[in-house]
Amino acid sequence: MLAYLECHTTSYQYYQKLRRLTNPAFPDSVPNRYAELHRVKRQWQNVKEIIEFGFAHNGKQPGEGDLAYFCAGCPQPGINLPEDWKNDPEKWKYHRSHCGDGCFSQVHQEPLTEENDIWLKSGEGFMTEKSRYAEHLASAEERKDPITCHEHRALKDRSRIHKGCDVTGICSVACMRHGAFVPTAQVDMQKGERQMNMDYATSKAWSYQDITEAEFLIWGYDVNCQYQPHHKERVAASEFLSLPEGLEDKIYYAIGTWHVHGHKNECYPRHATSFIRGAGVKSAEILEARWSELNHAAPSLRYMTLAHRAEMLDALLNDMNWKTMVNLREPPMFLIGPGQVPGPSPWSKGKKSDSDNGMVTWHVPLPSQVNSSTSIPRAYWDAKDTEIILRMGEANDALQAIRAEIGYKSYVYRAQIRPYKGKNRRTRGWDNIKRSDRELKFHQKAYTNALAALRILGASAEVLAQYKDITKEDLKTVTAVSEPNAQGQSKEKLAWFWGLNVAGDSDGSEHLEELYRISWLRAKSRKERWEEECVLLKSEMGWTVNYYKHKSTEWTQLALGSESDKQYLAFAQSELWRFLHDRAKSEFDLYLRSGISVDYL
């Protein structure tokens, strides 16, 4: 089984290896025991799971999702949360966030003859229980709503049939933050990625464990702009679907950071995780990475019986969840200390600078222009402080003009160029861009001269710290205005000079007022997401350690209540979870030296 999980070696390939090891010269002479090996492997895997999850010790029958690991880092009441978690002033962090996606690589070839296989389990792992799911599909009707966004593949191919296949892929749901698959919430697709398939997957994910006490849910899906509008109607019309009680109106529908840039512009502010309260800094695209691992097994899964395929998918997803869970003990790549959270520039309405009144024209050479001359009287340098003030005013005026031109260029790109494809309609826009570029060069030169003069005059370090060199990158248009749906905006920062004299710019230009408003809101959103991420990371450290402790205690209780011949295995399992607990806690404690507190049970 390990050879299949790690190398995706099929039973037949493994059997052929055994034959060659048995008789390297004449492997065909070895008796054919492939059918027996295949049957024993399936039975052994089933028995192993029953023992691994404690059902050989407690004498109970496993229910839905009982033979599957979930996520140690997600909040789970009664497992890894303190008893008083409902009274926590930061109760928002106990929400659940899931993301869903369809994988079209996991197809299944329709058998030539009717399958006569035995289902060793159905619904106890990750793949959903088949009979109730079949009833849902028989009663559900796929809505043919008009496509209001771009024609994404998930929408365009939802009725597409794969010739010769009875399963065209799987719809999966995983936790958004760690990528752990949700037990019972993985379903087969019969055509394309239809809403009836994803509806059932989300319903099973939200019914797994009790999440009704959460403040809200976050649901990430590539086409949520199409999926959300009639979701509640579809749930209400089906007896097989449900929403968590009390959370029907508290579901935030997100679109992954990578996919949202392929949507219409209005989808970005509505569904991007950057603007969703409580999302932290997560992309909602983690399933894409999971598919790259799972797709290696697709060729072997294609020709298995449906029962065997479900068992192997359960084993693969369980193995991926286990690796994810034990690796949660690794500390995050970063952990920002108190007061160090990145945020927006200190933009606020204030008084105009006294230097905004313009530059006074002098009819005598200025000190900065005669600095190298030795014939100038010493008293002439008394005017140096006055010139420094004038040069600061000149630099401020040039920077204000530069900001105004960049804001105007951003507006021209959005209003006069990008909406049109025809050459005639865009010509005026490009003319405006060229004129604005000429103005930018002029004002940049004026600023460069003023900055050089300040350095020659020996201005104070405080003054020189305000004015820096302007690079070509600093003069780019502001993407938030010129192309609101462009990629990479969550990491994009405005040039240093945008934090100077915001009040004066906003009052003098409608383009800059809009630019500052949009940029400030996006910077504020980034600040809030990073603050949430720090809170969530610290909480997840505690939840992970608490989960390991809960599992260790659970196995200790099973050992004490079991017969003597079963106690050894139960105590061994308890020690395994205790080791994970101790290792994770010791590594997380490295961060506690900086004054960061984590709540352990």
Image: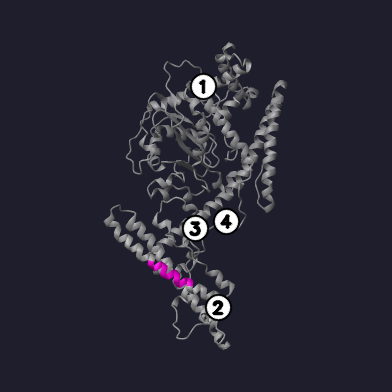
Is 134 left or right of 292, judged from the image as shown?
A: left
Give SS at disc 3: loop
Distance from disc 2 to disc 1, alpha carbons, whole Å, reads 82 Å
- Please state which of residues 354 and 68 is positioned toward the viewer in this rendering: 354
Of the numbered discs 1 and 3, the one sitting upstream in the chain is: 1
How far from the left and from the top, in percent, is residue 548? 65, 37
Distance from disc 1 to disc 3, alpha carbons, whole Å, reads 52 Å
Type of the residue with mark 4: Val
Question: Dot 4 corresponds to which residue?
Answer: 341
- CB contact under 8 Å: marks 4 and 2: no
> Around disc 1, counting alpha carbons within 10 Å, would you say few (fewer than 14), some (14 to 19), or many (20 or more)?
some
In the picture as drawn, the residue positioned furthest to the front comes out as: 25
Of the numbered discs 2 and 3, the one sitting upstream in the chain is: 2
Question: Dot 3 corresponds to which residue?
Answer: 493
- CB contact under 8 Å: marks 1 and 4: no
Q: Which of the numbered marks, if any, corresponds to residue 308?
A: 1
How far from the left and from the top, in percent, is residue 423? 28, 55
Distance from disc 3 to disc 4, alpha carbons, whole Å, reads 15 Å
Distance from disc 4 to disc 2, alpha carbons, whole Å, reads 37 Å
Question: Dot 2 corresponds to which residue?
Answer: 457
How far from the left and from the top, in percent, is residue 214? 53, 42
Question: In this view of the protein, can residue 512 be seen by the observer?
Answer: no
Instruction: Identify the residue at horizontal 37%, vertical 28% (top origin).
Output: 161
Type of the residue with mark 2: Leu
Query: For the magenta stretch, what is the residue range?
Result: 438-448
- CB contact under 8 Å: marks 3 and 4: no
Q: Main secondary structure of the magenta part?
A: helix
